[in-house]
Amino acid sequence: MRWLDVAFDRALLESVLVGSVCGLIGVQVVLRRQAFFTMAMTHATFPGVVIAAVLGVNLYLGGAVAGVLAALAVTVLSRRRGHDASMATAVALAAGFSLGVALLSTQNGFTRNLTAYLTGSILTVGEQDLVVAAAVTAGVALVLAAVHKELLYTAFDHHGARAAGYRTGAMDLLVLLLIEAVVVTSVPAVGTILTLALVVAPAGAARLWTDRVAGMTAFAVAVAVSSAVGGLYLSRAFDVAAGGAISLVAAACFALSTIVAPRQGLIARAAHRRRRRTPPATEPGRAAPGEPVPATGS
Amino acid sequence: MHATLVEPFSVPFMARALTELLLLAVLAGVVSTHVLTRRLGFVADAMTHTVFPGIVLGFLSAGVDGVLPGALAAAAVTAILLTLLTRSRRVTDDTALAVLLAAMFAVGVVLVSRRASYTADLTSFLFGRLLTVTAGQIAQTAVVAGLVLTTLAVLHKELLLRAFDPRAAAAMGYRIWLLDLVLNLAVALVVVAAAQSVGTILVIALLVVPAATGRLVSDRIAPITLAGVAVAALSGYLGLAISYRASVSHGLRLAGGATVVLTMVAVYLLTLLAAGLARALRSRRTSDAVA
């Protein structure tokens, strides 16, 4: 393919692929409140990538192994009395990241590699990165489509799903592994912060616009892909870091949605409150329809 | 043994690094206990990233002297935004937090990327330079520590009540949002104080691991805090010594901040193991007594 020889075209294709897969998994992350876990995964896969680079094996493999270990550590630690999931996640994050930094500091070229890892260097993606991203995007989409009913049930009614005979533990683990797969694919190409922004912001924005999961997924993928592509063009136009520009566009979509989204947005809620406050045009002494009934007892 | 544990700190820059770390240890032990009781792990993590653009802006506008004011301004803005975000329950906290974190960090990255010395700058912003801590920075840390510790000591009862029974606290007339704001500001100040020495990113370890270790050995607040301070101080000392020994005697360069954190995690894991063993022994003994 002729056009793939140009770095910018490769970056464009990579941003479309990463945008799609991040938007897809983002819906699960937002519905299951796994944003902090995603953040921890972006940092905890780091030592694996460094070790793989030092040993000369595949970077994705190293990241994947470290990610599985971190996911297991979070699961085990959060079961201890007095430890909740957020603390276990924070410990795993700190441990993984400092291990990566310490390992990297023993090598030459410390700063350059690290910066690429944190902020991404989407303009240097190679064809192998594109193939991996395409394969993971397809794989994640297939798995999500295959088990989407079970995923929904366990996300919204964990006890009900267990009582109905679903293996909720397996489902939770599956979601963690899918998140890990997305993180491992995206981080070497586009950086940790950008991955977090592209996973959480589009899906969070979509959640404000719709209550339906299918619509939310389509919306999240659309926002993620357009943020990635738009940010890439912005970064070229203004000569700033691509990862930063893409994150900012995605965050702007989320911020805009919190203001203008129907029903959930700030404007809609202010209007709603105003409507409730103005006295209803009914005769006095009767509650207008929609007026909250004063609570009695308790 | 003497060569490894005492000798390194006769060098002035090592002594300064150790002083800075010991000050931070006291601060981290106390603040991390509050982070533990309020489950602010993600908030603390977000804070470490959102201070970053302030540091960059301060540095770009006024050089090294601008770093502290810039970081303080960014920390104050984030503490207020986080308090507002966690107050409204519409968007789930963690989604909004994650977006705020990524966006503020991206602002920092975009600003730094306009500079020529992009990567070196970014790295020192993120990872600090533990071994180049100056006497002035130590004085700054001491002032911050005094301020934060005094505030938390004065509000100790109120903060605990708010952590364990927010409804009762509200019913007794305490302003929950004000208490939250004070605690968020305290966390932000620790991040600012530690940002220049251990770096913005490794601060998260200081804010979580000490109390997590303390929690393994006790259920009570005071012992958790004391154990946290001890763990942070011990790992600061050992981590520095290890990093120095590795680079001087073995030619292995180990980043100081990262080595300190790794030591802290190692202490945590050892305590985890010891606590597990102790519990197994105790349950064996009770089952023997019953039999």
Image (cartoon, helix red, strand yellow):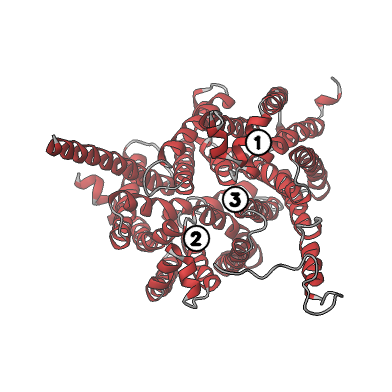
What distance separates the C-alpha of mark 3 from that of mark 2?
17 Å
In the image, what residue occupies the spot 22% across and 46% down? Answer: B3
- Name the spot of residue B131 as percent of width and height, x first: 42, 54
Chain hosting mark 1: A
The foreground one among A10 and B130 is A10
Q: Relative to B12, is B47 on the left or the right?
A: right
Quadrant for the C terminus of chain B, please: top left
In the picture, the disc for residue B191 is 2
Q: Are marks 1 and 3 in contact (CB under 8 Å)?
A: no
Label 3 sits on a secondary structure element that is helix
Chain letter of disc 2? B
Please state which amino acid type lies under the numbered disc 2.
Val
- The three-letter code of the residue at mark 3 reads Leu
- Tell me which corner region of the image, top left, top right, bottom left or bottom right, holds residue A80: top left
* Rendering coords of residue B164 (x, y %): 42, 62
- Residue B282 drawn at (x, y percent): 19, 41
Residue at mark 1 shares a chain with residue at mark 3: no
Name the mark on residue B122: 3
Left-right relation of A278 to B39: right
Does residue A261 appear left or right of residue A75 in this picture? Answer: right
Number of numbered discs: 3
Residue displayed at 76% across by 35% down: A15
**Residue topped by disc 1:** A152
Q: Which class describes the residues within 10 Å of circle 2: few (<14), some (14-19), or many (20+)?
A: many
Separation of residues labelled 1 and 3 (CA atoms): 41 Å
Q: Position of residue A37 (x, y in %)?
A: 55, 42
